[in-house]
Image (tube, rainbow, N blue to C red):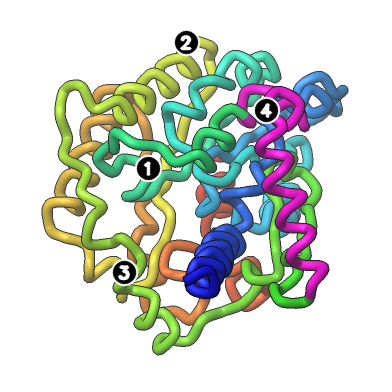
Amino acid sequence: MNGKITLCVIISFFFTFTLLFSINASSLDPTPSLFNYQFFTQEFDPNKKIIFLLGSSNVGQLNVTKINEMVSSQHNDYEIFNLSYNADTPKIRFKSIEETISLKPKYVFYGVSFLDFKHPTEKENIFDIKFSFAQLLPDNTIEKFNPKFNTVEKIKEAFVSTGLFPPPRKIFSISNTPFFEYNEDSTKIMTEDELKRELPLSGVYASEINLTDDHQEVQYFEKIISEFQKNNIKVVVFTTPVPNLYYNALSDSVKDDFNKLLEKVSNDYDVEIYNFSNEFGDMDIYWDLIHVSYNEKSLVYSESVAKIILKEIES
């Protein structure tokens, strides 16, 4: 009997820590705090007009170096910064609106996807809570505030050291992208067969938007646009691309609600909308079902965003 109990305990621990390690690194390792004072208090080139790219990881996958090259080749008085970060939503983004406005950008290009407006859920797991708090506090504050989170990291390190689990993925940063980090996975390009295998696990079938008058993400999206416009900052919205496999699996109601929302924002706030949702759907440029790869072979996305920036500058 004692042997069975011991075996059950070992199995339970094994599955618990397997779950911890299988969770995407972005869940356990929060993106650097939006209140990164080094960025918001830095000295910007007074001879340059600032352009910000906003959005979640879909926008993070843009190659801002390429975009700056294309824009500066025709307008060298502009500099673009990509302020995207993982799991961004309008509600989270609004928390940094004052800091963003204080930098007086000339333009804001806001990239959105179907997932940004999916119907809100009531529950958050512990990792989501850690991530949300991390957006509001200086680096490492959350671990000091609650040592349990730090304990999770120590346990991860201990299990990796045994060789039974893979080491953390290599992380690298890109200039002019202060809040987003890349890993080796985000540079890969999946085959269509690999994307097909991901589809049942993607949540695509449960991503309903369900537009209502009290939809918080929609309300915050409109507030963000309104606040920028009050401060004479032009807002341009673009939708982020997905492969045809994902786009075709979305329900008609999701697509209809998304398009209705964009049309309403365009009409109510006189905002230009550029729709890339299925613009590159048949191209082999994706590292998963909702992200373009950060790869030389996937530059068409970044080049397209650079072109709309140039169009807006010259309009």
In depth, the one of 155 and 202 nearer the eye is 155
Mark 3 or mark 2: whose residue is earlier in sequence: 2
Which contiguous range is marked in magenta?
A: 134-162
Q: Position of residue 17 (x, y in %)?
A: 59, 61
**Residue tagged by mark 3?**
246
Q: Position of residue 33 (x, y in %)?
A: 69, 31
At horizontal 69% and vertical 73% (from top left) the residue drawn is 165
Name which residue type carries label 1. Answer: Asp
In depth, the one of 182 and 21 nearer the eye is 21
Tags 3 and 4 touching, CB below 8 Å: no
**Residue tagged by mark 2?**
230
State the SS at label 2.
helix
Q: Residue furthest front?
A: 1
Label 1 vs label 2: CA separation?
Answer: 24 Å
State the SS at label 4.
loop
Q: Is residue 300 visible?
A: no
Local crowd size for mark 4, using a 10 Å CA cut-off: few (<14), some (14–19), many (≥20): few
Tell me: 162 left or right of 265: right
**Residue tagged by mark 1?**
116
Name which residue type carries label 3. Answer: Tyr
Residue 101: image quadrant is: top right
**Residue tagged by mark 4?**
146
Q: How many marks?
A: 4
State the SS at label 1.
helix
Label 2 vs label 4: CA separation?
Answer: 39 Å
Magenta-colored stretch includes residue 221: no
Prevailing secondary structure class for the magenta stretch in the rendered image: helix
Q: Position of residue 57 (x, y in %)?
A: 55, 51
Mark 4 or mark 1: whose residue is earlier in sequence: 1
